[in-house]
Image: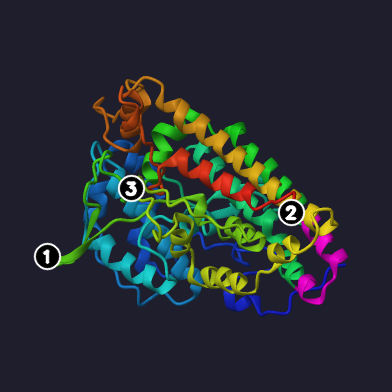
Amino acid sequence: MLESPTIPLDQFSVSLHNGFLPTEPPLQHLPDPYYAPWESVMADLPDLISTGYIRREVLRLPVLSTDKLYREAEWQRAYLILAFLTHAYIWGGKRPEDRLPPSIACPILEVSTHLELPPCATYAALNLWNFATVSETDADLTNPDNLALINSLTGTDDERWFLVISVAMEACGAKTIPLVLNGINAVEIGDNDLLVRVLNEMTACIEELGCILERMYERNRPAVFYHQIRPLLAGSKNMTAAGLPNGVFYDIGDGKGDWHQYSGGSNAQSSLIQLFDIAFGIEHLASGEVGHKEAGHRAFMQEMRNYMPGPHRRFLEYIGTVANIRQYAMSLPASSDVRQTYNTAVMKLGGFRDKHIQIVTRYIIMQARKSQSSPSDRSVSGTQRLNLASATSACMDSKKKEAQVFYGTGGTALIPFLKATRDETKAAARFVD
């Protein structure tokens, strides 16, 4: 039996049971009626986006104070609301809107500062704080069939499935936290048998995560994801082709404000996935930025930690200061059980990233090859929309191969970044001395 970790996980908002998910179910509504205007728009959000009325409704909203937010769950609920409204306002029309009005800009800047997050739709808003169980008697969060969304941008079951798959993975991967801590402890006390057991269990966990990830195909239709869901998740960074050359101006009133460029929601913002990298001593050098190959450019994976809740980011930083598994494994002969088990675990993580690349290929690259005249890529008036979907399709249609750089919602050059990340993962394994 593995020992329980001795560090106070509460200070990192991490739990042994739920991992990086909240220990209590996320709030489905803000309790103070003062915030009813926000909740009212959220209740009709998919319809407002699909009918083209979302911007009108956002402009009608008053500039509400954050003074009536008390518990952390309330701040998280407010962040979810404002992040969804931010992306709905920016991307919910025929063309993107590059100025965010004070009714959203003012409160989201305050809420995001409190939560130590950027003022946009991050993985935390979309996934960690946006789920509920379908059954009151079955609280198994590892089963996506048992999960519902609190809020949706499109109202489609495809979006629900896309997001709850990640929630289920987070719940399944919660067991990784004590495993990593026990693995580090095993190295410190020189217990190779314990370390082998830990690595074997981490390998099994990655296998489970891969099985959940592959369930994406069951209910998330590629065309719906590509044309309806993905464009609304896009950020404001590297989105020139999609209509945001300067990013978005956050207007705080009286002509004041600032231009910002943020990445959109990305699984690279999952603390769970990055925990594996840190525990295994995997270094990611790929920046995900076209034309930024010079030494010293901050890697995208490192940058994505700024898109995690502050306590989670600090947990990863803490693990990074004590991680010792790879160094120890590589100090042993290639034939040792520890070294072989470590290599197996790392290659399993590389295989997990192969599955991610396959999903991206099916849901984005293959969809981009299809005709730009797809009805699902048009607004209610029949006019071609300008967004991430149309920009990616236009890029695929380009005869100039060098022009075909496809950006993800996080703002990365998609396939090159994912392949580099996969290759860097597998390179951590060394089978001979």
Residue marked by disc 2: 433
Observer-nearest of 323 and 307: 323
What kind of element bears circle 3? helix
Tag nearer the camera, 3 or 2: 2
The answer to whether residue 345 is left or right of residue 12 is: right
Give the total number of marks visible in the rendering: 3
Q: Amino acid at mark 2?
A: Asp
Q: In the image, which residues are magenta?
A: 185-201
The question of residue 124 being in magenta is answered with no
| The magenta stretch spans residue 196 | yes
**Where residue 88 is drawn, which disc sits there?**
3
Alpha-carbon neighbours of circle 3 within 10 Å: few (<14), some, or many (≥20)?
many
Q: Callout 1: helix, strand or loop? A: loop
Q: Which of the two discs, 3 and 2, labels the residue nearer the N terminus?
A: 3
Disc 1 marks a residue whose amino acid type is Gly
Q: Residue at image x 26%, y 53%?
A: 58
Q: Amino acid at mark 3?
A: Ala
